[in-house]
Image (cartoon, rainbow, N blue to C red):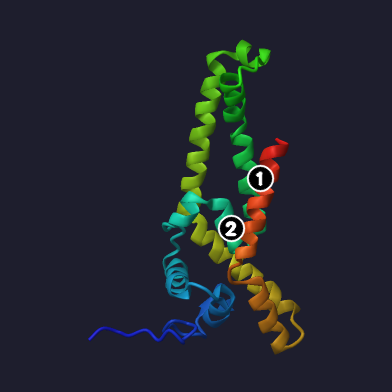
Amino acid sequence: DGVRLNPNDPCVGLDPNEQMDGVTMGDVAEFVSTNRFYYLPLFRLMKQTGRKFSFNLICLLFPDFYFANRKMWLLSLGTMLLNVLLDIPTAVLYLTQYYNIALPWVDAAGTGFEQLYNIAGMLWLAFKMFCCLFANYLYYRFAVRKIGKIKKGAASEPELHAQMQSAGGTSTANIVLAFVIKCALMFTM
């Protein structure tokens, strides 16, 4: 008979007192909140083996929204900005080809600009692959750092738990906000 996991166990069968780079597994479980069955064993494996890569399909498809959902705003905004910058050659080619807008500097660049378009596309794909492979590790490091800061600054046990719940978990509202920010960035560029 296989091991049965208790869905009410916040540490999904792992030792809540196990040390995870200066914080406990129980702290990480409280911070992660959602999808603990996926993250806690993965974080434990990363800590034990030193392995930094794993596969995160959502981050491959939507890295900026993944980071926003997990409240990693610096990475989310950086990803959005990189995406918009790498989309500039696409936007310029779209304007010149589909709207017949003549841009002399594009014509002067000739096929060099089309190569820039191809390079930008490959760079974006490479960045998304990097995010796909390292997002879980980045989230682990983010969680440990954030928990450490919260534990140093919390004046009481109830305040600690309130801050952990507020800073951790996921936020659908952040995805919507990230979408709005991304659209605003795209229209201003």
Observer-nearest residue: 134 or 170? Answer: 170
Q: Which mark is residue 183?
A: 1
Position of residue 143 relative to residue 95, above or below, is below
Check disc 2 and give the amino acid type. Phe
Name the quadrant containing residue 32. Answer: bottom right
Residue placed farthest to the left in the image? 1
> Residue 80: x and y, percent?
63, 46
Between discs 2 and 1, the one toward the N terminus: 2
Q: From the viewer's perspective, tell me whether residue 44 is left or right of residue 117.
A: left
Residue in the image at 54% along x and 32% along y: 120
In the structure shown, which secondary structural element does the residue marked by tag 1 occupy? helix
> Residue 8: x and y, percent?
46, 87
Observer-nearest residue: 5 or 137? Answer: 5
Residue in the image at 43% along x and 55% along y: 57
> Residue 29: x and y, percent?
53, 78
Crowd class of label 1 (few under 14; some 14 to 19; many from 20; radius 10 Å): few
Position of residue 103 relative to residue 146, above or below, is above
Check disc 1 and give the amino acid type. Cys
Mark 2 lies on residue = 67
